[in-house]
Image (spheres, coloured by chain):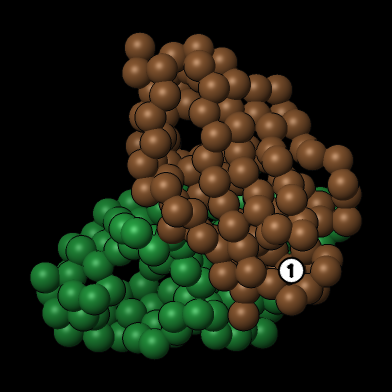
Chain colours: A brown, B green
Amino acid sequence: AQTVTQSQPEMSVQEAETVTLSCTYDTSESDYYLFWYKQPPSRQMILVIRQEAYKQQNATENRFSVNFQKAAKSFSLKISDSQLGDAAMYFCAYRSASYGKLTFGQGTILTVHP
Amino acid sequence: NAGVTQTPKFQVLKTGQSMTLQCAQDMNHEYMSWYRQDPGMGLRLIHYSVGAGITDQGEVPNGYNVSRSTTEDFPLRLLSAAPSQTSVYFCASSYSEGVGGQNEKLFFGSGTQLSVL
């Protein structure tokens, strides 16, 4: 079974600074997808970024980028130029290429200080 | 386009009561699933369905029943609520169980906060 671990229960960053959230996972599969979801206080789950395991290039979405290290099974999220609206719970998630079930990490609460 | 609609948003139950959490999607998605979110544990899969008439258990199925009589609806039933079922519940759907193309994106409902006293 796949497992996803987020070792940082809480992180904080100053507005306009950069922060990196960590995620590691364990799998025996070679083909899979990785995701970062944002959950603001509204409880809504918002897809931030995704990475296909077969792609070596790290995914980027505006201020959000990932550092995908397949051999190390690491998938960190970097948020540049942090904004107050980035404050939320962030979840790392794994999805097999064979089936649709998502496996989530424990979550990291990000606080952004003005 | 409504997306994934969950009702109710909040519910308080007494131990032993039963209830059904409703989930409906209007995107003609084949794949639907239920997760529960607990502090420090992330989201865990309860049950899922890959199409009408087909359901299967996820990671934490005990105490919950599901059915999928139509493509649109995927209700979650608590037959005899217990305090351990106090949680936030999310319904999520995608085009199909497979990945590739538009299948990778999972659409989430807004969640149901359930308290069992």
Tell how many labels: 1
Residue B57, image x, y percentages: 55, 85
Residue at the spot of label 1: A96
Judge whether residue A7 can be spotted in this image: yes
Judge whether residue B109 can be spotted in this image: no
- Would you place residue A86 above or below residue B82 in this image? above
Image check: B117 left or right of A68?
A: left
Amino acid type at image mark 1 = Ser
Q: Residue at x 72, y 29 (%)?
A: A61
The one nearer the camera, B40 or B76, is B40
Image check: A72 left or right of B38?
A: right
User: Which secondary structure, mark 1?
Assistant: strand
Neighbour tally class for label 1: few under 14, some 14-19, many 20 plus, Cα within 10 Å: many
The one nearer the camera, A97 or A68, is A68
Quarter of image, res B65: bottom left
Quarter of image, res A4: bottom right
**Disc 1: which chain?**
A
Residue B31, image x, y percentages: 69, 68
- Would you place residue B43 above or below residue A69 in this image? below
